Image (spheres, rainbow, N blue to C red):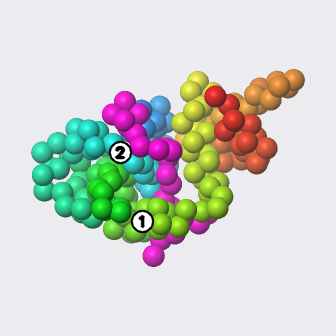
Amino acid sequence: MPTTTLDSPFRRIFDGVASTSEALALLGRHDAAPMSKRRLSGKLHAGEWFELDWPTARSMAGQFLRILRPGGFVTLPGTRAEKVRSIVFSLLDADRERWFHGFTSLIDPDITPETMRAAIIDRLTTEPVERPRQEMLELIWNKAGDDGGYCDEIWPPGNEGFRTIVVRKPGYRPVLKLLAHLSPQEMALLLAKG
């Protein structure tokens, strides 16, 4: 069963329950990424998930929501250049229904709707004492605004399409880094930033 360990391909990318406007921002958070191998293969999206409020789930799934049963999922219509599919699914939790959106992979057999659902159930029932590093990076990325970007041709070969972020420490010049290379201290600073 998938878990929320450091090597898990599943990442919660938003704390709380997303409204329609927040969900739209989350769905488009990689739109500025270059059409690199990482984006086209779906690596930027696959495994990302977040919880939806009921009106947002209803507007996203539309007519498909009528056929959705608790624990099931619907694949949202639409085409993406990336090799991912967008799904909405529900889970019963303490006699109430909760709604989620996720991106599953069309090429990675480990990132399917079924494995995503199992990973989310695991995450919701065994909340880690410490949030996984990858999820903290996703929260930082969501708040980055203009300080977030993507590697282009000026970076060393092999970095194209990886996410970058500007780190602003008081008393120092801003530094551009790969998001994945942030130190624990830099992560704490960026998470504390309003």
**Amino acid type, callout 1:** Ile
Instruction: Look at the image and say whether residue 95 sits in the magenta stretch.
Output: no
- Evaluate whether residue 142 shows in this view: yes
Which range of residues does the magenta coloring cover? 1-23
Determine the secondary structure under disc 2.
Answer: strand
- Total numbered labels: 2
Q: Is residue 18 above or below residue 147?
A: below
Q: Residue at x 41, y 33 (%)?
A: 22
- In the picture as drawn, the residue positioned furthest to the front comes out as 95
- On residue 131, the disc is none
Q: Is residue 127 above or below residue 82?
A: below
- Give the class, few, some or many, for how many residues have Cα within 10 Å of label 2's Cα (few <14, many ≥20): many
Residue 143, percent from left and from top: 57, 33
Disc 2/disc 1 C-alpha distance (Å) = 15 Å
Q: Where residue 149 appears, x then y in whole percent?
A: 58, 32
Nearer to us in this view, 24 or 162: 24
**Which of 126/36 is in front?**
126
The vertical placement of 159 against 2, above or below, is: above
Report whether 186 appears left or right of 109.
right
Q: Is residue 108 visible?
A: no
Residue extending farthest to the bottom is 1
In the visual, does 91 lie left or right of 78?
right
> In percent of the image, x 33 and y 34: which residue is there?
20
Mark 1 highlights which residue?
A: 121
Please report the residue visible at 80 percent of the width from the left and 29 percent of the height from the top.
169
Location of mark 2 (residue): 52
Which badge, 2 or 1, comes first in the chain's sequence?
2
The residue carrying pointer 1 sits among few (fewer than 14), some (14 to 19) or many (20 or more) residues within 10 Å by Cα, namely: some
Residue 180, horizontal then vertical, whole percent: 66, 48
Residue at 33 percent of width and 54 percent of height: 98
| Residue 46, x across and y down, in percent | 43, 54
